[in-house]
Amino acid sequence: MSVFERFMMGLIFAAALPIALFNVGWKFCEYFYNGDYLVICALSGLILGIIADILFLRKILLNAYSAGTVLPIFIYAFYLICFLLCFRKFPIFILIPGLFAGIYEGRKLFHFKANSYESGYRIERVSQLTSAGMAISCIISAFFVYLEFDESIDFIRRLFNTPDLIIEQWIVLISIILASTVLIFIQYWITRKAALLAYGKEERK
């Protein structure tokens, strides 16, 4: 495993625990202490996650490609939720976890020297998975847009500097459907392309 590959696997696997514990500490403080010790609780969770990574990072990297199927899917779902919560109305950022999923799957197939049939099947499956994740994200983002419809329209007006612009709900709905369809296909293509490049199949053609 190259230095860059170790960095990528560390970024994918090692970052999940500190982020998760940071959020646990944050929510724990909000729920039990009304946010009085928010910084302390959040940073405590982050530090615990970093310590766990320091203790177990080598083992994580050595077993990154032997993690089976459930753990990588769980980590992908975790990052998808994090990006969705950060960019609620902009599912375009969900392309990033899908990109990393493709890279991981491609390198995993390369590591195990998968044949053409198996690699094609696995890459197709991971591309379908990330496309489904994008579809779900687009639906949730649409829900947030309509939940805060006036704020969303005001943002569009400020973005294009058109304060008198009138946008009907049906126009927004059609725009969301078209944009979501495009994003789903882009996600499929990005994941598949990243996996093929990481696997090395593109170079062998």
Image (cartoon, rainbow, N blue to C red):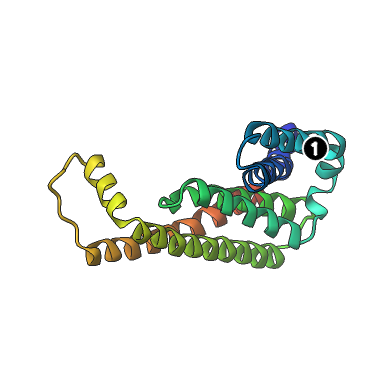
- Which residue is rendered at x = 41% and y = 52% of the image? 89
Q: Which residue lies furthest to the left in this view?
A: 164
Residue located beneath label 1 in the image: 53
Residue 181: % across, % down: 39, 64
The residue under the point 80% across, 37% down is 53
Vertical comparison of 23 with 69: above or below: above
User: What's the residue at 29%, 65% (across, down)?
Assistant: 173
Q: Quadrant of residue 51?
A: top right
Q: Nearer the viewer, residue 203 or 144?
A: 144
Residue type of the residue flagged with mark 1: Asp
Specify few, some or many for label 1: CA neighbours under 10 Å numbering under 14, 14-19, or 20 or more: many
Of residues 164 and 9, the one drawn nearer to the viewer in this rendering: 164
Image spot of residue 161 (x, y percent): 19, 39
Can residue 97 be spotted in the picture?
yes
- On screen, residue 84 versus residue 48, left or right, reads left
Residue 107, position as x, y percentages in the image:
70, 49
Q: Which of 174 and 126 is in front in this view?
A: 174
Taking depth in this image into account, of 150 and 34 the one nearest to the observer is 34
Give the side of residue 72 with respect to residue 53, left or right. Answer: left
Q: In this view, does 142 lie to the left or right of 132?
A: left
Q: In which quarter of the image is residue 46?
A: top right
Q: Is mark 1 on a helix, strand or loop?
A: helix
Residue 205 in sight here: no
Q: Where, quadrant-wise, is the N terminus in this rendering? A: top right
Residue drawn at x 74%, y 62% is: 70
